[in-house]
Image (spheres, rainbow, N blue to C red):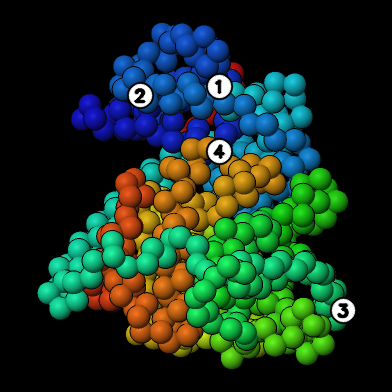
Amino acid sequence: MKKLLRYLSFGLLSTLLTATPGIAADRISFFYPPFGEFSLSADSLETFAKEGKITDELALYASRATPEQLAQLRELLQQRFNITPTLVSQFTYSPIGEQVVRRLGELLLNDSRQNGFYALRSALIIAAADPQGLTVVNVLRKFPSSTVRLNFSEGIQIVNNFSELLRTRDAVVSFIQREAIKETLIKATTANVNFAFKPDLRQPGPFDLQKISFPLNDVKRDRRLPVDLYLPVAKSQTTQDLPSAPFPLIVISHGLASDRTAFTYLAEHLVSYGFAVTVLEHPGSNAERFELYFAGLAGPPEPLEFINRPLDVKYVLDSLQRLEQIDPAVRGKLDFQKVGAIGHSFGGYTALTLAGGQINFAQLSEDCNPNRSLNLSLFLQCRADELPEINYPLQDDRIKAVIAINPIDSSVLGQAGISQIKVPTMLVTGSQDIFAPAVLEQIRPFTWLPNPNKYLVLIENATHFTAIDELDAESDVLPVPSTLLGPDRTPAYGYIKALSVAFLESHLLNKPEYRAYLQPSYAQYLSQAPLNLSLIQSLTAEQLTPIIKGSTFRSEKLSQPQLTTTSP
């Protein structure tokens, strides 16, 4: 009983404050039978935040919390979010921002017991403009309502669902790691490879590079596409018998609010192994667009980006084919019969659609009307539900293999869309990705891929930002707290480089000598804590079902409000 009371009082309170920075009243009171009514003033929170002093009324909750929980609460209350009112306004008035704030408003109801969306949006903007800045306590003070009713049951449901998702994730990650070890032991009896005596694919290959940058302009779609083209150049001093032109071509698609520098390290590495690489920027969802958006000079990314992104890649490939016929610097150097695609996050979606994945409007309709999920990427995916429901020709038959890193796909493609992908595919996931959760966005979708030449790469403790270039991950376009960047990313760069070379050499160039690198034993060989690496090729829905059975992937219907906050 004591543990339950601790959870209901302090645990839920801190969770709600973390998730929804704004409680309107000077006083917080809630009733939960059989424990009765509890009360806490905003002043006591402010005193605790500024002085670390626990008032008599806060002591009731503090006595039921651990020192760690108290420290976390005070850190949260002290946290000032350095975000301009323009940025807050732009986000909260955008389609995605409105969805997020409306979802939070289901926890914070107004005087009329309705969704507190408008009051919460107002409080966030006013607090951001205030000299005190955007803090939890300041949003408390700016909330323009005399009474706020907190939906207590919905809060409990969210906490329970989130905890269940975390337990499911940990169970699935452990299962994959065990399966990788099992496969390693089984295959060791027939193919025991000592990778210490094989070439280290993390190290650069024998080629130098030539980089050509140029803009493309798709007049029909009014899309200006900055492009970098990396071409292999034989080192002058080499005596090796190197592959010659035309070189297989790899196209890289960046994620949301990123740019073509995000995977420079990977582009340069692939070029060193004799691949030509082209990296483009998607003007409707790149870093430059978000800078304009946050400055109030442009609108948010449009739903049409789900169509335009793969069409951008197709246009770049078409342009390179024309350029290859007329430009002496490129002529004869690109092999359009051997083209691969690599993408991260939104770029992962882009790569999968180019490989044959189809937009799944039925799944979007089910998941987005309304969006009740704890999956943050669904706020972006649901924008595709606004598109006209037609069959969009997004596949490019030139794409023969794809690598999707932290892709978003569970609803926008779904099982029906992903099952159309017939080319060799590698999915890369991070166990600590809170934006495109591993189980929902990569692990379950992996089981939907029909091609036997598929690989699931799991990097334990990796986040959504682990695979991208360090400078890009820490850019100021979308400020990311250091705690969300995860551990040192250096080992992960090595994993991505080595496995990309092995996969593309094996499945784009059909070189059997690279198949040994696509084994669980090689991942085990590369693995470095805390970013432990696992690779498996065989995983079925039947294996996952017992693990995830009963897990709540979608929140249940909103419960009736049971917690009330009022001003004196």
Indicate the secondary structure of the residue bearing disc 4.
loop
Indicate the secondary structure of the residue bearing disc 2.
helix
Q: Earlier along the polypeptide chain: callout 1 or callout 4?
A: 1
Q: Earlier along the polypeptide chain: callout 3 or callout 1?
A: 1
Which circle marks residue 219 in the picture?
Answer: 3
Indicate the secondary structure of the residue bearing disc 3.
loop
Q: Earlier along the polypeptide chain: callout 4 or callout 3?
A: 3
**Within 10 angstroms of label 3, few (less than 14), some, or many (20 or more) residues?**
few
Using residue 277 as the reference point, say whether residue 434 is left or right of it. Answer: left
Verify CB contact (< 8 Å) between mark 3 and mark 1: no
Q: CA distance from mark 1 to mark 4?
A: 15 Å
Whether residue 293 is situated above or below residue 382 in the rendered picture: above
Give the labeled residue for mark 4.
481
Q: Residue at x 83, y 78 (%)?
A: 218
Q: CA distance from mark 2 to mark 3?
A: 57 Å
Verify CB contact (< 8 Å) between mark 2 and mark 1: no
Which circle marks residue 68 in the picture?
Answer: 2
Residue 475 quadrant? top right
Which circle marks residue 78 in the picture?
Answer: 1
Q: Which amino acid type is marked by label 3? A: Val
Looking at the image, the residue that sits furthest to the left is 189
Whether residue 511 is situated above or below residue 15 in the rendered picture: below
Of the 4 image quadrants, the one containing the N terminus is: top left
Q: Which amino acid type is marked by label 2? A: Glu
Image coordinates of residue 233 in percent, x first then y, are 64, 72
Q: Earlier along the polypeptide chain: callout 2 or callout 1?
A: 2
Q: CA distance from mark 4 to mark 3?
A: 39 Å
Q: Which amino acid type is marked by label 4? A: Pro
